[in-house]
Image (cartoon, rainbow, N blue to C red):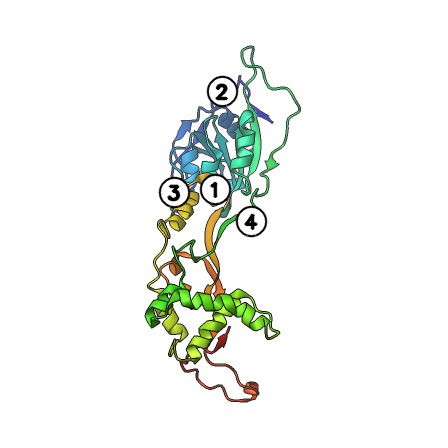
Amino acid sequence: MFCQDADLEPLALNYIDVTDGTGPMVTAAPSITTTHPVAVASASSYSRRGHTVVATSLSAAVGIDGLPGSALLVADAGIAECVLEDRTDPALMAPGIEALVADGWEVTVLVPAPRMGAAHWGLRGSSAMLQAWCGGRGPANPSNSGRPRYPERVPPPLYTQPVVAFIWDFDRTLIPSNQQDALFDAYGVDPDAFWREVDGLTRFYQARGVKIGRDAAYLLHILTYVREGIFEGLTNARLRELGAGIEPAPGIPEFFEATRRHVADEPRYSASGITVEHYTVSTGILPMIEGSPLAPHLDGIWANTFVEEQAPPGYLSHLDMPSTEMPISALG
């Protein structure tokens, strides 16, 4: 615990506020007087040991406007001390602390003792040291009791997995209906008739000793429609083109960007590296989703694929032939 001495006189310090875009620079300047008693006490300690101390505002040191507090730069020792006031929000200064560390400074943040909890939270995961300071001695302001403490490490990040991932279904969630409707419309197929056939396929195959799930059944039925010429010439490229006509549900994809922006604009989250990502896991058709207006706003897509050209037996010993666009013929 760092306790200021009420009898300590303000110390004249070299000062200049200079930045080069990468961090504070320390140069000779006319002397001024810093008035923050904790900064005075700390600067005096370094001065008596022969160090050159530059005093500046906390905002100037960390490169973030509007932060109340002071900062001391001990250039010949590579030490930066940031002195917070009661009203300083530690979370707001976290990016500036990391910038100082990246510039080679050894950073200690001097925090009012009652605000240590807030500093642990706001600076969690940063590379700085924390040290509490308390009020000065005197009849009206007795010093805090208890054994003094050395600076302590900032706790490790609270969020070791800082990605907030939204996992979405696609049909009737991100879009108001089924993605396959675009396929049926393009080829003049009655969707109700198609799905009735799909519903009967599990029983059809089970009667022949084959167990098959509904999701596989509908994909196989699409391939049957291709083979029978109903979906004539249907390729993966054509599926992507049809996906472009899929209409998103109301508020999508605007909601994706709003959640990302909300977290990015909140200092408590951004200081801990928290981000938002959006994914879809669908029993639908991958090329159709990839071709949809939602694809650029998704961080990942899991869905079913079709193979156009199947590898023949012995293909490893044959010269690789260039692929040509062919109708889909198998499940991927």
The residue that disc 3 covers is 19
Contact between labelled residues 2 and 1, with CB atoms less than 8 Å apart:
no
* Residue furthest right in the image: 147
Give the residue drawn at x 63%, y 19%: 145
Callout 2, which amino acid?
Glu
Give the residue drawn at x 39%, y 70%: 239
Element under label 3?
loop
Q: Residues within 10 Å of mark 4 (few under 14, many from 20)?
A: few
Q: Quadrant of residue 139?
A: top right
Callout 3, which amino acid?
Thr
For the N terminus, give its image quadrant: top right
The residue that disc 2 covers is 9
Circle 1 or circle 3, nearest the eye: 1
Circle 4 or circle 3, nearest the eye: 4
Element under label 2?
loop
Element under label 4?
loop
Q: Position of residue 237 (x, y in %)?
A: 38, 73
Q: Residues within 10 Å of mark 3 (few under 14, many from 20)?
A: few
The residue that disc 4 covers is 161
Contact between labelled residues 3 and 4, with CB atoms less than 8 Å apart:
no
Q: Is 76 in front, or is 197?
A: 197
Q: Quadrant of residue 156?
A: top right
Q: Is 50 in front, or is 298?
A: 298
Horizontally, residue 65 falls left or right of residue 122, namely left
* Dot placed on the residue nearer the N-terminal end, 1 or 2: 2
Q: Residues within 10 Å of mark 2 (few under 14, many from 20)?
A: few
Horizontally, residue 3 falls left or right of residue 309, namely right
Q: Position of residue 46 (x, y in %)?
A: 54, 32
Give the residue drawn at x 48%, y 70%: 219
Which numbered circle lies on residue 269?
1
Q: CA distance from mark 2 to mark 3?
A: 29 Å
